[in-house]
Image (tube, rainbow, N blue to C red):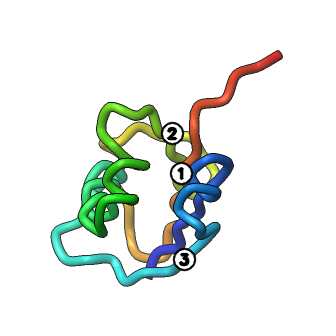
């Protein structure tokens, strides 16, 4: 089981702030998880489109899409943030 968190524009557009899912067989990285979520339908594929910049964190550390994920991890998705 992994916990997925959605922040800011992603949360607002998808209408969900968190969920828990069983880690599907063959899913190994954050990028794999994004690809799986995109398969949920038009809203998901548009919001998490490969051309849209989405940042990710695993267990509260910002990561790249090739970062492995494991059962028990918390994965967060959020739009890029800027300082100011």
Q: What residue lies at 53% left-to-right and 73% top-to-bottom?
A: 3
Q: Where the C terminus falls, by quadrant?
A: top right
In this rendering, is residue 61 above or below 74?
A: above
Residue 67 drawn at (x, y percent): 36, 46
> Mark on residue 77?
1
Q: What residue lies at 59% left-to-right and 58% top-to-bottom?
A: 6
Q: Quadrant of residue 82?
A: top right
Residue 8 drawn at (x, y percent): 68, 48
* Distance from the alpha carbon under mark 2 to that under mark 1: 6 Å
Specify which label sits upstream in the sequence, 2 or 1: 2
Residue 46 drawn at (x, y percent): 36, 48
Query: In the rendered structure, are the residues bearing label 2 and label 1 in contact, judged by CB atoms less than 8 Å apart?
Result: yes
In this rendering, is residue 74 above or below 84?
A: below
Q: Secondary structure at mark 3?
A: strand
Q: Residue furthest right?
A: 84
In this rendering, is residue 53 above or below 5?
A: above
Specify which label sits upstream in the sequence, 3 or 2: 3
Residue 20 drawn at (x, y percent): 50, 80
Q: Secondary structure at mark 2?
A: strand
Q: Which residue is mark 3?
A: 19
Q: Is residue 33 something that shows in the picture?
A: no
Q: Which residue is mark 2?
A: 55
Q: Is residue 14 left or right of residue 60?
A: left
């Amino acid at each position: 089981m992994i916990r997925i968190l959605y922040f800011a524009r992603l949360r607002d557009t998808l209408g969900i702030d968190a969920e828990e899912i069983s880690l599907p067989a063959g899913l190994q990285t954050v990028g794999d998880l994004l690809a799986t979520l995109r398969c949920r339908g038009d809203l998901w594929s548009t919001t998490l489109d490969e051309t849209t910049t989405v940042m990710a964190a695993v267990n509260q550390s910002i990561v790249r899409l090739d970062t492995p994920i494991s059962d028990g991890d918390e994965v967060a998705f959020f739009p890029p943030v800027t300082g100011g």
